[in-house]
């Protein structure tokens, strides 16, 4: 299992590749394969054939899962891109923390 410190609902920024500098919301995390799906990033187009004849197929665009090594988290508190740190809350729960503003979430 690959550890991804990103969760559904996080906002990330793409640092490299064709979607570089795009930001988007995480809509899926596959912990088994280590792949991330982000709204508006790594868009693929699929043509769905109509089941009936004489009808045009439909073009469907969807975000495809990709390797999260090129993304960074956008801190929900300070809005900066940051690496994810960890803190242990007083409750003993492990929380993620922004390396820049030190807020935990
Ligand atoms: Zn922050």
Image (cartoon, rainbow, N blue to C red):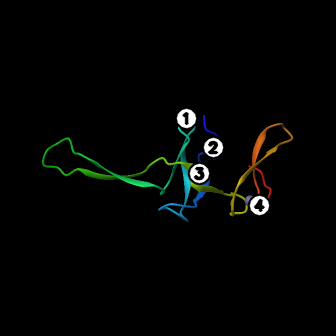
The answer to whether 39 appears left or right of 86 in the picture is left
Q: Earlier in the sequence, mark 4 or mark 3?
A: 3
Counting residues from the start of the chain, the first of labels 2 and 4 encountered is 2
| Residue 86 place in picture, x, y as percent | 77, 46
- The residue to which callout 3 is attached is 69
Image quarter for ligand 1 equals bottom right
The crowd level at tag 2 (other Cα within 10 Å; few <14, some 14-19, many 20+) is some
Q: Secondary structure at mark 1?
A: loop
| Label 4, label 3: how far apart the Cα atoms are | 20 Å
Q: Which residue is mark 2?
A: 4
Whether the residue carrying mark 3 lies under 8 Å from ligand 1 is answered with no
Q: Residue at 77% of width from left, 40% of height from top?
A: 94
Residue at coordinates 77% horizontally, 56% vertically from top-left?
Answer: 99
Q: Position of residue 75 (x, y in %)?
A: 69, 58
Mark 1–mark 4 Cα distance, whole angstroms, equals 29 Å
- Contact between marks 1 and 4 (CB within 8 A): the answer is no
Image coords of residue 97 (percent x, y) = 76, 51
**Which residue is tagged 1?**
32
Helix, strand or loop at mark 3: helix
Crowd around label 1: few <14 · some 14–19 · many ≥20 (10 Å): few
As drawn, the label of residue 50 is none
- Helix, strand or loop under label 4: loop
Secondary element type, mark 2: loop
């Amino acid at each position: 299992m690959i550890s991804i410190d990103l969760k559904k609902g996080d906002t990330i920024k793409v640092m490299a590749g064709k979607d570089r500098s795009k930001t988007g919301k995480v809509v899926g995390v596959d912990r088994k394969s280590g792949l991330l799906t982000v709204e508006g990033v790594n868009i693929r187009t699929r043509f769905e054939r109509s089941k009936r004849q004489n009808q045009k197929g439909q073009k469907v665009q969807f975000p495809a899962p990709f390797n999260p090594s090129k993304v960074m988290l956008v801190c929900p508190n300070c809005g900066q891109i940051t690496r994810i740190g960890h803190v242990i809350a007083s409750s003993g729960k492990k929380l993620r923390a922004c390396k820049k503003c030190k807020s935990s979430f």
